[in-house]
Image (cartoon, coloured by chain):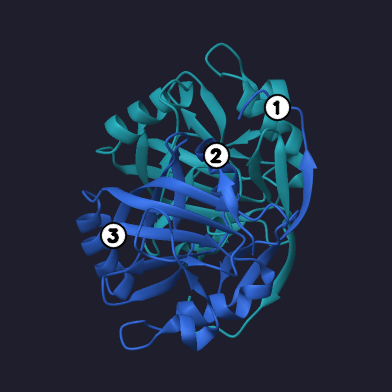
Chain colours: A blue, B cyan
Amino acid sequence: MAKTSLALSRVYQLLEPGPVVLVTTANRARANVMTLSWHMMMEFEPPLVGCVLSARNYSFSLLSESRECVINIPTRELAAQVVACGNTSGRRRDKFAAFGLAPTPAKCVLPPLIRECYASLECRVVDRRMAGRYNMFVLEVVKAWLDRAVARPRTIHHMGRGAFMVAGQVIHLPSRKK
Amino acid sequence: MAKTSLALSRVYQLLEPGPVVLVTTANRARANVMTLSWHMMMEFEPPLVGCVLSARNYSFSLLSESRECVINIPTRELAAQVVACGNTSGRRRDKFAAFGLAPTPAKCVLPPLIRECYASLECRVVDRRMAGRYNMFVLEVVKAWLDRAVARPRTIHHMGRGAFMVAGQVIHLPSRKK
């Protein structure tokens, strides 16, 4: 995937449709990746993203400590890896190697981009006050990457119990809104 | 739409794919409806849903005051109404009448279900502490309704600037997770 920079003002267009994402985290020793569907936009620019992840996850402690992550958006071709990342803990396993995902250096944060994903959003935690009660973090997207050669990304959308909806046709309606 | 009760434990299957929703609110005098894409699951059961809406919206004040709403999930057939609800304020206009949406009584809350939507989730606000800083409310779904005759709901997913992705095919992968 040949990703180039995307204006931060357009990040909402990637996340609002509700794709499953692969979130990478890291400390100085190693990186990890988890599957996540519990995210939402909270502000357009700078883009703020809320996300909730189980406190039992290894990624939760990495994110709490490092306060950085990358939200990577996979497509249909990566569905098997997405499920595998969701079913496996990275505490004692390198999921990148195990599932054939290539970590590549980010520009502003320590956790890696995932080469096979068509979009990647480098994020910093800006609010942890909801982490105790709701396992929720507020992230600010500080750098966004998009492979514009992927004209119609077939993102996948979790429906539970192993079922995923694949992004279908795009329709256009006159709108006065963003 | 002939909606019947849905187990609260399955609500996440409706919201995780990221559909645009129509949120109804009400006070004793009147009801309103708005279009919303900024929502996420926060807990499975009882289902908690986070949502962010602009404080400039009439629905924001109705939700702040009444602490109740209904999340209604529309499909492709309602796309024009979804955009119209997003482009119009209900402060001085009855959007139900204007756009041909039929309000029907909810069971546990004052705001109405929307008859034309295939699923409706009756919600109560359980946390307003993030409303000041992030315009965010935490909702608990107290009653869920689903029209099971809609076998493959073609939900619509906001991509910005009048573009929407329509739900495509559903794929199944072996998964150990919910």
Closer to the N terminus: mark 2 or mark 1? 2
Q: At x 42% / y 46%, what residue is drawn?
A: A141
Q: Which quadrant does the C terminus of chain A fall into?
A: top right
- Judged left or right of residue B174, residue A47 is left
Q: Which mark is in front, 2 or 3? A: 2
Q: Which mark is residue A7?
A: 2
Q: Examine the rendering and report whether any part of residue B177 can be seen.
A: no
Which residue: 66% across, 23% down?
Answer: A176
Say what amino acid the circle numbered 3 marks: Asn
| C-alpha gap between disc 2 and disc 1 | 21 Å
Task: Tell me the element at label 3.
Answer: loop
Work out whether disc 1 and disc 3 sit on a shared chain: yes
Q: Tell me whether circle 2 and circle 3 mark residues in contact (CB < 8 Å).
A: no
Mark 2 chain:
A
| Residue tagged 1 | A175
**Residue highlighted by disc 3:** A135
Q: What percent of the width, then of the height, locates residue B117? A: 67, 45
Chain at tag 1: A
**Callout 1: 10 Å neighbours few (<14), some, many (20+)?**
some
Question: Where is residue A5 shown, x and y percent of the image?
Answer: 56, 47
Task: Classify B120 as above or below B60.
Answer: below
Kind of residue at badge 1: Ser
Q: Give the mark, 1 or 3, whose residue is nearer the N terminus.
A: 3
Q: Position of residue A102 (x, y in %)?
A: 52, 75
The answer to whether residue B43 of the structure is visible from this angle is yes
Q: Nearer the viewer, residue B163 or B118?
A: B163
Quadrant where the N terminus of chain A is found in the figure:
bottom right
Residue depicted at 49% across the width and 42% down the height: B38
Q: Pick the residue in front: A80 or B89.
A: A80
